[in-house]
Image (cartoon, rainbow, N blue to C red):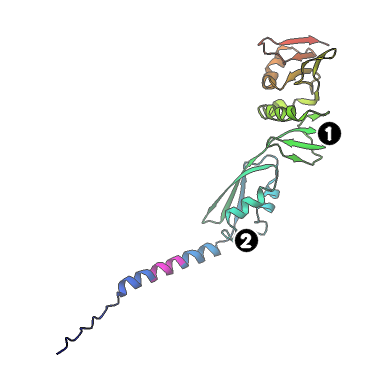
Amino acid sequence: MKNKKKKIKRKIKWKSIFKILIIFIIMGLIYLMIKIIPTNHIVVKGNNYVTDEEIINSSLYQDYPCLYCVNNHNIKKSLLNNPFINDVKIKRNLLGELTIIVDEARPLFFNRDKNRLILSNFKEVETNNLQGVPILTNYVPDELYEKLINGFNKLDKDVISLISEIIYDPWKNGDVVIDETRFFLQMNDGNHVYTNTIHLDKLNNYIDIYATLEGKKGTLYLDSSSDKISFSLF
């Protein structure tokens, strides 16, 4: 006689199926809850030059869609089109609050030759708002222009606001160029300053130096490696 094959009955593991089903239901409920959470409040942080309204309008949340309707990548991509914005961080909470934290570039000076506002990230902006920034009045060779921007990046905002005009003014003795990196600055207080791309950071001491002048007007020479401050009266 042939051996009869025994049929093996497989038991359905209902407990495991039920657990998986519960997990899917919970995930579905969480997904639906996320989708229906409204955006109740938008907070903007870190901005000094771009308004809250501009940031909100560029964030794809100007019409207050649901809190998670727009992903972080798309928000950042849209905001980074603004030349003033270097980076963006997004935070959300279940109370419907969206927080947008921006890292901004600083305006350094207005380039009259290009008719553009120059930012600390080297981007250029067309604007009529020149409040608080000096004006570069003449052409600067490319290799020095980059150094000028890097130098202004190291200056305090308050010091930059004290400068009225920047003039590229190489130091010459006849036909011999002694310092091709020199600049002449007209200050808002009436003083003049000579500096160069090597020692531009000395301008961060200008407020302290001004206090020692006791109201006298003249020309400061900050283009030397010497620690001594040279000043000549008008």
The image shows residue 64, relative to residue 148, as above or below, that is below
Measure the alpha-carbon separation of dots 2 and 1.
44 Å
State the image coordinates of residue 74 (x, y, percent, origin top left): 62, 55
List x then y, in percent, for residue 112: 83, 33
Q: Quadrant of the N terminus?
A: bottom left
On screen, residue 231 above or below 25: above
**Residue at the image point whose x is 82% and y is 36% from the top:** 114
Helix, strand or loop under label 2 = loop
Residue 14, quarter of picture: bottom left
In depth, the one of 123 and 2 nearer the eye is: 2
* Residue drawn 76% across the image and 25% down it: 163
Residue that label 1 marks: 113
Of circles 2 and 1, which is in front? 1
Q: Position of residue 169 (x, y in %)?
A: 81, 20
Q: Please give the range of residues in magenta.
A: 21-27
Q: Amino acid at mark 2?
A: Pro
Residue at image x 72%, y 16%?
223
Residue at the bottom extreme of this rendering: 1
Residue at far front of view: 1
- Give yes or no for residue 138 being in the magenta stretch: no
In the picture, measured across the screen, residue 165 lies left or right of residue 55, that is: right
Q: In the drawing, what numbered circle is on residue 132?
A: none
